[in-house]
Image: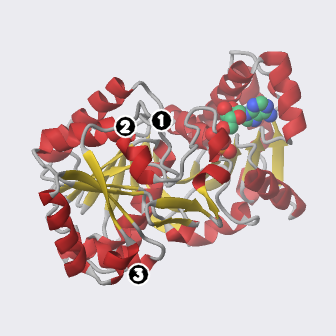
Amino acid sequence: MTMVLGCIADDFTGATDLANNLVRSGMRVVQTIGVPTGALNVEVDAVVVALKSRTTPAAEAVAQSLVALRWLQAQGAQQIYFKYCSTFDSTPAGNIGPVTEALMDALGTDFTIATPAFPDNGRTVFKGYLFAGNVLLNESGMQNHPLTPMQDANLVRVMQAQTQRQVGLIDYTVVARGPQAIGERIAALRVEGVGVAIVDATSNDDLLRLGPALKGMPLVTAGSGVAIGLPANWGLVPSSTASQLPPAQGLRAIVSGSCSQATRRQVAHFKAQGGAALALDPLQLTGDTEPVVAKVMAWAQPLLSQGPVLVYSTAEPEAVKAIQARLGAATAGALVEHALAAVARALAQAGVQQLVVAGGETSGACVQALGITQLQIGPQIDPGVPWCHAHGDAGPLHLTLKSGNFGTEDFFTKAWAGLA
Ligand code: ADP
């Protein structure tokens, strides 16, 4: 393996988002689910280790991240990329600050950058303030997030609250002047004792100017946006070979446990186009997945040869609320995830080798049920959503893991063309 860039992502779909940006910029990338136990038998430029460390206690996030770091170092990673959410999801307790500091200590480095900027997705940083679309982060709805309420858009303050090191700013006037000016600013900040610098970026051009200034920096911390400027540091340029996957074969299916608005539209669109679809009623589910799998497969078997089938629990907010009131939100979620994951496994055993999964948590459950531990990242279907190739218990398959609000309305019908 010739890995040069080693990445640690604090959640699953965030890892895919980062991997997707690296592939689009010319790197061959594998994403692993958790830290692998041994070496990977693949030729890649970057590995993205997906952790579940965004909202765990900080000490646990630090411990997991350090295990990932050690594995990446053992595989020869020359630079480490700590990836977090483009809305900087964190609290004064962490986990972005504590993980960043622990990685800096372990790498023996006294300086890194931090920027969640991802202009393609409307996340921009200006004078240290993070915007989500047209509004400041703390006016974007993120101020009400149940786990990581973001009530301050000033990232220098937000980061300073969760780290011992001094936090500074590389502002847009410096970034506009290019890599050399950014390098000079970094040198000046280090002299001042700054350990972490928030970086302004309002466009992809800013990120491409930032990239060369990060060459040789042991640790980069960022959302997925900064990734577009890094592959060039190793002489890699965008090419279609980076996203090449083995040829697709087998039957097609979609499993959807997301109730997000975009997914609800995608389900409705697929049905309106005449797609074969079966809804699961959470109230009919018990912990035993056998009856539901038997019912789904009896329905699906005769249809699979005619085109993709859709199995979904996707429902409107009122319906979800009513079910949650009956079962409790956590129980309902777990029952549905468990059932859909068992369905995904049965579909794969029945010959499905092209699978779309909708929903972040649903994806996690399905990947686990399919026995998948690593994904090779292929061509993008929609921003943040690439096709992947993996080896599961039932054999090789192509799959795409779509987080709730990603993808256009016709995602379930158009996605297949990306494998043709
Ligand atoms: P998203 O990416 O849209 O947030 P997730 O899969 O992460 O989707 O989360 C959706 C959650 O809602 C899952 O835990 C899923 O099991 C649960 N769920 C799905 N359908 C229903 C439903 N009809 N009623 C209650 N909960 C549901």
- Sequence order check, earlier mark of 1 and 3: 1
Q: Secondary structure at mark 2?
A: loop
SS of the residue under disc 1: loop
Above or below, 224 against 48 in this view is below
State whether residue 138 is above or below residue 163.
below
The answer to whether 274 appears left or right of 179 in the picture is right
Residue at far bottom of view: 177
Task: Tell me whether the residue at label 1 lies in contact with that at label 2, contact meaning CB atoms closer than 8 angstroms.
Answer: yes
Instruction: Name the spot of residue 366 as percent of width and height, x first.
Output: 56, 37
Image depth: mark 3 or mark 2 in front: 2
Q: In this figure, which residue is indicated by the disc labeled 1?
A: 91
Which residue is at the front of the view, 414 or 137? 137
Q: Is residue 121 visible?
A: yes
On the image, the x and y values in percent for residue 385 come to 55, 60
Residue found at x 49% / y 60%: 129
The residue to which callout 2 is attached is 162
Q: Find the residue positioned furthest to the front.
A: 192
Say which quarter of the image contains residue 311: top right
Residue occupying the far left of the picture: 108
* Label 3 crowd (10 A; few <14 / some 14-19 / many >=20): some
**Residue flagged by tag 1: what amino acid is it?**
Thr
Q: In the image, residue 284 lies at what x, y percent?
A: 83, 22
Nearest to viewer (mark 1 / mark 3): 1
Where is the N terminus found, in terms of image quarters?
bottom left
Label 1 CB sits under 8 Å from any ligand 1 atom: no
